[in-house]
């Protein structure tokens, strides 16, 4: 019997409230509402214990790229677990799934990437990357290069390393002190600026903040710049086209490492295999997780470019770092099959040429709604900005909580999207059909209406 069928819906809520401390949750307020108990999922839909069918416009947490209900992924895990459920890659050991996946990752990434270091999650990938970047400079005889530069409002996970590198103020306010020698510059958020510059001028100016920060810190102190190609959890911040080429130029000029955090953008989200491909930059390291297994099992890793890998290998000596579950065989088996699905069903190309442009065109129609100030989308990753005044683009009073209000209308009307302040974000599975895209847009419009009415009342 499935675990979900072993108790009544109300029993789950009761037990949940008593024993389960949820991540990123205000438990006092959760106690009032109780959790939505999600029991099963299929395709792009999730089903809850109260009998609701909900279109998952967030792919879980930006990860179920291949959609739910994939027997191929289930079989890949089960077969591998029967054969070899666990073994480690410490002490001169390896196993076929981790080796095969490494080969496949080399194949789908840019030519400088020939090696991969495995972790169990995005946060662990970030921690690995921070230690590897600093160790790289130690090996190069410049141990003073310790500082990593990231962006405000960036999300790089929730371990002490991830929270420190991320630029989320509320996270920095708890459990500190954060990891030293991490600096943050402003994000390339044109809509959030005073919009006096054109987007391209603004993008160049935002990139120049990196140069200014490097100069202020001392160029010989800086180890790397790290950024999500498109900031996800921060509100789907799509940088102007001028931004990333300028960032690349500055990193090259100062010789610092360029790292893209591909945890969301990787594995087809933007209609290319990785965000770096979409923006045509050449990172030295790429962190990944989420979509690599479509979330069916936890897995993450760091793609290590030749520049760093050569230093690690040629200089000899051990890199004292790794996890019990680095390259977990069942997770790697799922990742292998997941990449095969993306390839077999041409899902990356489909995002670029078919469902991406289709949803983007429909998504743009939401900009006509009276409380929408801007819509934006790349691939299957988009956002819309709620505004109180369409001509001045003035925001709603924060006390109204327009974003939260809209999000609650959405889920109660059968669509999951997330609110980041008054920015509504969307990232559906790459398998979304045209009909499902129409359903998503229809529900979004209806809930914008409901939000507008509720605020006016
Ligand atoms: C989700 C996320 C992470 C953290 O991944 P976890 O698997 O939750 O640890 C890191 N970086 C980005 C860009 C993310 O979206």
Image: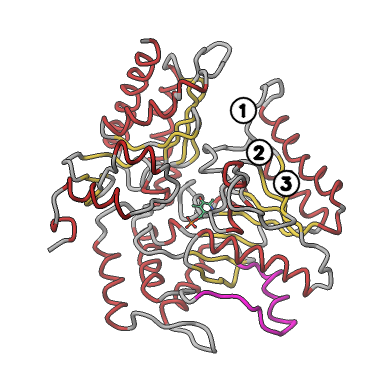
Q: Nearer the viewer's eye, disc 3 or disc 2?
A: 2
- Return the residue at label 3: 247
Q: Position of residue 179 (x, y in %)?
A: 68, 58
84 relative to 274, above or below = below
Q: Is residue 385 above or below residue 351?
A: above
C-alpha gap between disc 3 and disc 2: 12 Å
Where, quadrant-wise, is the C terminus in this rendering?
top left
Left or right, 61 with respect to 197, comes to left
Task: Please state the horizontal and vertical placement of residue 142, each as a whole percent of the image.
Answer: 84, 68
Q: Is mark 3 within 8 Å of ligand 1?
A: no
Q: Give the residue at x 56% y 50%.
A: 275
For mark 2, give the secondary structure.
loop
Q: Which picture quadrant has residue 124?
A: bottom right
Sequence-earlier tag: 3 or 2: 2
Q: Residues within 10 Å of mark 1 (few under 14, many from 20)?
A: few
Which picture quadrant has residue 126?
Answer: bottom right
Part of the protein shown in magenta: 304-323
Residue placed under numbered mark 2 in the picture: 187
Q: Are marks 1 and 2 in contact (CB under 8 Å)?
A: yes
**Which residue is tagged 1?**
192
Q: Nearer the viewer, residue 85 or 271?
A: 85
Find residue 74 and report its horizontal and vertical position in percent.
Answer: 27, 66
Residue 83 among those drawn in magenta: no
Provide residue 397's location: percent of width, then percent of height. Answer: 52, 18
Mark toward the start of the polypeptide (1 vs 2): 2
């Amino acid at each position: 019997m499935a675990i979900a069928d072993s108790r009544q819906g109300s029993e789950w809520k009761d037990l949940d409230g008593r024993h389960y401390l949820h991540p990123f949750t205000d438990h006092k307020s959760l106690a009032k509402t109780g959790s939505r108990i999600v029991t099963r999922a299929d395709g792009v839909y999730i089903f809850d214990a109260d009998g609701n069918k909900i279109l998952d416009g967030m792919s879980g947490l930006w990860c179920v790229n291949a959609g739910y209900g994939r027997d191929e992924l289930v079989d890949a895990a089960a077969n591998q677990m029967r054969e070899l459920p666990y073994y480690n890659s410490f002490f001169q050991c390896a196993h076929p799934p981790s080796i095969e996946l490494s080969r496949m990752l080399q194949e789908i990434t840019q030519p400088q990437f020939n090696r991969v270091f495995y972790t169990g999650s995005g946060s662990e990938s970030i921690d690995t990357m921070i230690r590897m970047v600093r160790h790289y400079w130690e090996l190069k005889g410049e141990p003073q290069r310790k500082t990593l530069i990231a962006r405000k409002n960036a999300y790089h996970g929730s371990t002490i390393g991830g929270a420190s590198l991320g630029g989320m103020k509320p996270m920095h306010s708890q459990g500190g002190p954060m990891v030293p020698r991490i600096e943050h510059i402003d994000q390339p958020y044109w809509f959030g600026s005073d919009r006096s510059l054109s987007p391209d001028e603004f993008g160049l100016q935002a990139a120049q903040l990196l140069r200014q920060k490097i100069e202020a810190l001392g160029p010989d102190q800086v180890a790397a710049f790290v950024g999500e190609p498109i900031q996800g959890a921060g509100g789907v911040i799509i940088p102007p086209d001028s931004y990333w080429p300028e960032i690349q130029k500055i990193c090259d000029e100062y010789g610092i490492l360029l790292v893209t955090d591909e945890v969301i953008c990787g594995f087809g989200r933007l209609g290319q295999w990785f965000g770096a491909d979409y923006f045509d930059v050449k990172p030295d390291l790429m962190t990944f997780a989420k979509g690599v297994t479509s979330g069916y099992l936890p897995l993450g890793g760091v793609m290590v470019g030749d520049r760093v890998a050569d230093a690690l290998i040629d200089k000899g000596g051990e890199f004292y770092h790794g996890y019990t579950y680095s390259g977990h065989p069942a997770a790697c088996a799922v990742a292998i099959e997941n990449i095969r699905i993306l390839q077999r069903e041409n899902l990356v190309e489909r995002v670029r040429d078919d469902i991406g442009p289709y949803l983007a065109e429909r998504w743009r129609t939401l900009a006509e709604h009276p409380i929408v100030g801007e819509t934006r989308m790349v691939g299957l990753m988009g956002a819309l900005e709620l505004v109180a005044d369409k001509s001045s683009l003035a925001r709603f009073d924060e006390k109204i909580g327009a974003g939260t209000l809209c999000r609650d209308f959405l889920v109660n009307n059968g669509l999951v999207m997330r609110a980041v302040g008054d920015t509504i974000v969307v990232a559906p599975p790459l398998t979304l059909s045209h009909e499902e895209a129409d359903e998503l847009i229809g529900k979004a419009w209806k809930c914008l209406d409901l939000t507008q009415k509720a605020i006016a009342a």
